[in-house]
Image: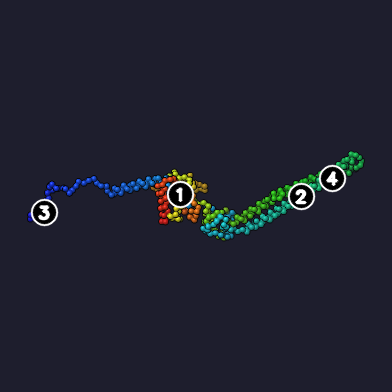
């Protein structure tokens, strides 16, 4: 082994005065990147949780909302076969438009028959009036005869008193008989007049038979008018499956009219959203039928009761099916929202879905976030 090799293999002396001058003492450890990221995430989660708690009370939001409107079943008030239809499914109609025609022939005949009955009643009233006049004249004649018979009887009595032998018994009997007959004639004439008056009833337009005939005529005319089914309001025809020849029963729906009289949104809010909602609170919403469009409205009313779903009779409380999940969903109550009719025009499809946010007060930060939230939800309607 050479001296060079021995020199290389000789271990270095680590005890010299400069030993360890290049290895400083380690300081306190710096926070790791993972730890900083964890703190940031926790802070964001705490902020989101705080925002959720406040927003849930002051700017409640729901996507369980639907468009509602008044619907009217279109019915024929008289039975008959449909002779003509002037609308189709989804036709837009205005109030007073003719929709269907019921076969009018039998109703026109009923009107003509009722008119004839009125004429006959009027003639009957005229005949009864003439009978009353004749009976009145007969009574006048009977009273005249009675007056003459009474004067003859009085004269006979005076003659008998002044000169008992001037008149025979037969003359006195004839005078007495004439008076009795005249009295009876007046009674008979009075009875005939009363009978004629009872048969006539009230005179003129107040006559019972005439009023009955006129009422039947008006009823027949009304049935004839009802043979034309017209639109009671502006709206759109739905559930329409009628063609000429279809028999329309009185009162049975033959189509449905979705009216434009009143359109509203029913937003089913969670029970813990309702604490700060008041009537008149401003609302912003988006309809799935028009993604990206924000519509303004106001709270009209807040529901005070819902059904538990076990009853389904007419007039029951509204039933709202709760969501099923691993946590109990709070009960939802309907919040009714009024919309600007011009702004909702053409968009109010009954049953259409909507997203709704309610602003319950002056909360600048929460309201700003809420407006951003509803706009994002509106844009997301493009991909639903």
Given residues 92 and 195, the one toward you in this image is: 92
- Asked whether the beta carbons under mark 2 and mark 4 sit within 8 Å of each other, the answer is no
The residue that label 1 is drawn on is 283
Circle 4: element type: helix
Q: Which residue is mark 2?
A: 133
Crowding around mark 2 (Cα neighbors within 10 Å: few <14, some 14 to 19, many 20+) is some
Residue 116 in the image: state x and y as whole percent: 68, 56
Residue sitting at the far left: 2
Comparing labels 1 and 2, the label whose residue is closer to the camera? 1
The residue positioned 83% from the left and 46% from the top of the image is 145
Marks 2/4: CA–CA distance: 23 Å
Q: Which label is found at residue 42?
A: none
Marks 1/2: CA–CA distance: 79 Å
Q: Which mark is residue 8?
A: 3
Left or right, residue 252 beside residue 208: left
Mark toward the start of the polypeptide (1 vs 3): 3
Foreground tag (3 vs 2):
3
Q: Earlier in the sequence, mark 1 or mark 2?
A: 2
């Amino acid at each position: 082994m050479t001296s060079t090799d021995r020199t290389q293999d000789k271990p270095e002396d680590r005890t010299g005065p400069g030993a360890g001058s290049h290895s400083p003492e380690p300081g306190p450890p710096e926070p790791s990147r993972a730890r900083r990221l964890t703190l940031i995430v926790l802070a964001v989660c705490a902020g989101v949780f705080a925002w959720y708690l406040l927003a849930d009370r002051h700017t409640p939001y729901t996507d369980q909302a639907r468009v509602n409107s008044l619907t009217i079943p279109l019915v024929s008030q008289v039975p008959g076969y449909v002779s003509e239809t002037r609308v189709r499914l989804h036709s837009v109609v205005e109030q007073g438009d003719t929709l269907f025609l019921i076969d009018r022939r039998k109703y026109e005949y009923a009107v003509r028959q009722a008119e004839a009955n009125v004429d006959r009643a009027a003639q009957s009233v005229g005949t009864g009036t003439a009978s009353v006049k004749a009976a009145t004249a007969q009574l006048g004649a009977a009273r005249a005869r009675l007056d003459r018979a009474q004067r003859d009887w009085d004269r006979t009595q005076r003659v008998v008193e002044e000169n008992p032998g001037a008149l025979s018994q037969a003359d006195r009997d004839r005078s007495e008989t004439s008076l009795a007959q005249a009295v009876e004639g007046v009674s008979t004439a009075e009875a005939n007049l009363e009978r004629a008056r009872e048969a006539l009833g009230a005179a003129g337009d107040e006559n019972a038979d005439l009023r009955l005939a006129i009422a039947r005529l008006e009823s027949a005319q009304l049935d004839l008018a009802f043979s034309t089914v017209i639109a009671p309001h502006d709206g759109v025809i739905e559930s329409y499956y009628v063609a000429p020849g279809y028999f329309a029963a009185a009162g049975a729906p033959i189509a449905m009219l979705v009216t434009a009289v009143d359109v509203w949104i029913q937003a089913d809010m969670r029970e813990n959203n309702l604490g700060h909602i008041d009537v008149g609170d401003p609302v912003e919403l988006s309809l799935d039928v028009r993604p990206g469009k924000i519509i303004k409205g106001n709270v009209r009313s807040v529901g005070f009761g819902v059904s538990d779903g076990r009853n389904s009779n007419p007039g029951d409380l509204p039933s709202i099916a709760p969501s099923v999940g691993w946590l109990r969903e709070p009960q939802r109550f309907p919040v009714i929202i009024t919309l600007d009719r011009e702004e909702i025009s053409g968009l109010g499809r009954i049953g259409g879905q909507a997203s709704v946010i309610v602003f319950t007060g002056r909360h600048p930060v929460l309201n700003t976030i809420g407006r951003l939230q509803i706009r994002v939800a509106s844009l997301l309607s493009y991909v639903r």
